[in-house]
Amino acid sequence: MKRALITGVNGQDGSYLAELLLENGYEVYGLMRRKSVVDYGNVEHIKDKINFIYADMQDVVSLIRAMRISQADEVYNLAAQSFVATSWDTPCTTADIDAVGVTNMLEAIRVVKPEAKFYQASTSEMFGKVQAIPQTETTPFYPRSPYGVAKLYGYWITKNYRESYDMYACSGILFNHESERRGLEFVTRKITNSVARIKLGLLDHVELGNLDAKRDWGHSKDYVKAMWLILQQDKPEDYVVATGTTITVRDFAKAAFKAAGIEVEFEGSGVDEIAKDKATGKVVLKVNPKFFRPAEVELLVGDPSKAEKELGWVREISFDEMVERMVANDLKLVEKEIKSANL
């Protein structure tokens, strides 16, 4: 039985990855930070199948202890301060977790079990101000946020340990991937949750930032399969994981409203742009300048050819299906909220 250690196990990706590994017969260990109230997050439904270890990415001693306890054959580093907007407010903490934290985990592996395979969750935000379209494994990086910069350090230190210590250490450069388990602070889940509230009469409209930003969106469940495949290869290499298609925030919102049975039409442009419900004429979406980034990333679209060819990775959940799943899930959650409030 293989052993796997997942940092960030109770997040969106960590939960889907834990499910996948358990299905494949792994003994799964997950890192948790000590809190006054235990929060299993997205792994509440499988918490009895996971061996939890208290540790912190900023504390290398705790990570060494976690490696000694787990004796992991595979380590998936998904822990991060992953909200881009917050990285401008907490740049030092973001660097401590997303950059130095990766080094701490690599050191723990090197000291305890250097033959273990290591996966680093890298991000398309490292491309930032894109130097080529689409972005591949050889496209130069140009991060545009403290988050992107910190993640770029994590990417390079992973490559450095691979080349310096002959470790099986590699990165998956994952483009935007969402799901029903995505946190409410992320724009995609903010949209689907707000759409559900508008549909059920709890909200008048949703406020968003740059509607022209283009992203390459896939489903988390498909992307964690790529993570696992990356560590099943004979030699460690880095891979771009993406859909190869790009969609604006505007079109994501339009698809979310459609999934809830609301047809919208957009009017105006820039900060004056709005969306109206075609049936009622009510404004259901407004642009708010406060949600614009200090340095915008206008376009991200990846080329997954290498992953498809070498890993045999196949995307199974389409964009429309992903949005429909997210909206349906949020409608159920909001209906439950309403029912509880009326009891």
Image (cartoon, rainbow, N blue to C red):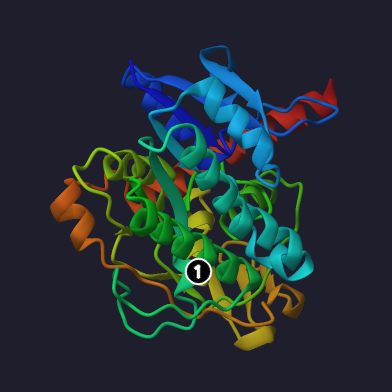
Q: Quadrant of residue 141?
A: bottom left
Q: Amino acid at mark 1?
A: Glu
Residue drawn at x 27%, y 41% is 229
Residue drawn at x 77%, y 64% is 90
Q: Position of residue 265 (x, y in %)?
A: 53, 72
Helix, strand or loop status at disc 1: helix
Residue drawn at x 36%, y 71% is 301
Q: Position of residue 191 (x, y in %)?
A: 61, 57
Q: Position of residue 166 (x, y in %)?
A: 32, 50
Q: Which residue carries the number 1 mark?
A: 125
Q: Position of residue 233 (x, y in %)?
A: 21, 42
Residue drawn at x 33%, y 77% is 139
Which image quarter is the N terminus in?
top left
- 166 shown above or below 215: above
Between 22 and 153, the residue placed more toward the observer is 153
Q: Is residue 161 left or right of residue 209?
A: left
- 206 shown above or below 54: below
Q: Quadrant of residue 65?
A: top right
